[in-house]
Structure formats: C-alpha cells, structure tokens
Image (cartoon, rainbow, N blue to C red):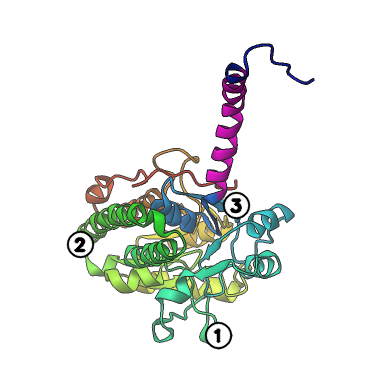
Amino acid sequence: MALRCRVAPPVCLLLALALLSPLVACVSAASSDDDRLRIATTVAPITSIVAAVAGDRADVEGIVPEGADSHTFEPPPSAARVLATADVLFMNGLWLEEPTRDLAEANLGSETRVVALGDEVLPEDEYVFDFSFPEEAGRPNPHLWTNPLMAARYAEVVRDTLVELDPDNAEAYEANLDAFLRRVDELDRAVREAGETLPPERRKLLTYHDSWPYFARDYGWEVIGAVQPSDFAEPSPREVARLIEQIRDTGVPAIFGSEVFPSPVVRRIGEETGVRHVDVLRDDDLPGEPGDDEHSWFGLMSENFVTMIEALGGDAAAIRAVPVAPTAPDEAVYPQ
C-alpha cells in the first residue's frame, strides 16, 4: 500500500528519510557482513588455531565434525555450500583429509585460496614415517598440531594468509597471533617442566592412534608403537603379540587408547601385560562444547599432556596452571 504524505513537501521528505533509514542501515550491515572474509577449515584443532588468529574479524566454519575420522570422513552435501562461498580453505594437508580435498577441488571458487598448513611448514626431509604411516606408502604422519611448536608455525601461516587477503584487518590479525604465540610459549615451557618430572625411561608412548611423533621428536619423548595399523583396521593377532612384547621389554607403566577411535584391543593389551590403559587421548576432538573455555586447541593439548604425564607417574601441575580459554574471541562454527 502506498504511503501518501499530507504534510508540507520538506517535512514529507524528512519523514520518508526517517522511514528509510532503518532499511538503509540493514543494507549497510549486510554489505559489511558480505565484506568479511569467509574462511573454511577442516578438523577442529585447525579451526581453533585459525579462529585464534581471525578473532572477530572474519567468519570461520569447520567442515569435519568433531570426533569424526578425518582420514576417511566423507563430507556431506552441506559442506559444498561452505566451500563454494569460502575465500580461503585452511586444511592440514599431508594427505590427512583427502575426501575433503576432493570435495573442495570440485566446489571451491576459481579465486579461493587453499592453504595446506602441514605442507607449508614441514619440509620433506622432516617427514616422519612410522607404525601407521610407513614410508613405502609415501604418506608421512600428518599430525603436526599435537606439537605446540608446529601449531605456532601453523598460526603464523594463517596470519600471513589473512593479512594478504584482508589487509584492512592486518593489525588485529597480528595482535591475535601475538596473544596466541605468548600462550603457546607458556604451554611449551610447562610441558617441558612437567616432562622433566618423569625419568627418561618413562617418557615413552604406546598409543592406539599414531598422533604423537612430532611432539616426541621435539620434547625428548619416544613413541615405541601404535596399535592401529596403517589401514586403520584392528591389528592382527601377530601385531598384538608384538606390541605386548614391546611393552614387556620397555617396562612402560601405561598405554593409551583413543576417545575418537575406541577399541577393545588396548584394554586387552593392558590386561595381558598388567599395565594401566587410558582411553581418553584425543587428537582432533576438542574437549567440552563450543563456547566452553576448554573447547580450544589449548584445552585439547592440555588435557592430553596432563593425561599422559600423570598416567606415567609424573607431575602435570605446571600444565594445569596454563589457561586453556581461547586467546581471541572464538566465533567459529564447529560441526558436531
């Protein structure tokens, strides 16, 4: 219905502008939102690291649900929508999320940047091939983010990318990175201090999922084995017998299962060898719920390090003292 003005023309003009101003504001807000950088990510730890750098200056949305097997996860059709509108996709790379990469290649815009963080920070001569990632397969262990030093390098690559794509918010991205790196330094010192409460012969890991070699290499630990074989199936009886022999030979007091990959094998191995079995390690499922303080990369790593050190007989008080809440506003979308 048309609005008919019965007052003087100047007054009518003012009235019309007053009525239109909220609509103009809405359009301006929508335009501003459209100008925000749209960021897609894969697994939750990477989403958390990216969100720590992006803060409230960009829209961040993950694709791989927390607790899913990122090695084999097939993204749903809804992920194509996220990818189709993204300005940049941050993924781990190193062959971790191949189904997601395939979907991205089919749906990303022609100008969308794809940043494989692992490929960016890890030269080939530093690849780790091991129990679940044998060299003959040609694909190195991709779990770099469980090493705080490498998580810091991931964040630096994120900062470089965001500053290039969104220079107007460069100052905010730089400040967010600085805050993240300061906390990583604090966690790094705490992990080393807590690790020293264990004698070297106890700084040994036998885990279900093979996620810790880069951490072990830089922090003076040794990964003596992984239960899950390279095809991600359950181990054969011969492989289980070999692991039992390793545990008896090394004298490790605890072995570690995975919350993401539940398996009765770890329990059976623990019962057979008489060592403690702990089933709560996780490498890409953040603790708590989105919005909780502990739902962050820091929360994930703190929980894992405390679990490992205390189960092996050490004192993790230094790690418990490090805050785990995000260092910048975390407005990312984490699929569940």
Which one is earlier in the sequence, the residue at label 3 or at label 2? 3
**Residue 277 can be seen in this image:** no
- First in sequence: mark 3 or mark 1? 3
Q: Secondary structure at mark 1?
A: loop
Q: Nearer the viewer, residue 55 or 170?
A: 170
The N terminus lies in which quarter of the figure? top right
Q: CA distance from mark 1 to mark 2?
A: 35 Å
x 67%, y 59%: residue: 84
Image point (57%, 44%), residue name: 31
Up-down relation of residue 121 to residue 44 (above or below): below
- Please, what is the three-letter code of the amino acid marked with disc 2? Glu
Which one is in front in this view, the residue at disc 3 or the one at disc 2?
Answer: 3
Cα–Cα gap, marks 3 and 1: 27 Å
199 left or right of 14 in image: left
Q: Which mark is residue 196?
A: 2
Seen in the picture, residue 300 relative to 156 is either above or below; the reply is: above
**Which secondary structure dominates the residues rendered in magenta?**
helix
Q: CA distance from mark 3 to mark 2?
A: 35 Å
Amino acid tagged 1: Gly
Decide whether residue 23 is among the magenta residues: yes
- Name the N-terminal-most of marks 1 and 2: 1
For mark 2, does the 10 Å Cα neighbourhood hold few (<14), some (14 to 19), or many (20 or more) residues?
A: some
* Disc 1 target residue: 138
Asked which secondary structure carries label 3, the reply is: loop
Q: Is residue 208 visible?
A: yes
Q: Secondary structure at mark 2?
A: loop
Residue 186 horizontal/vertical position (percent) = 23, 54
Is disc 3 surrounded by few (<14), some (14 to 19) or many (20+) residues within 10 Å? Answer: some
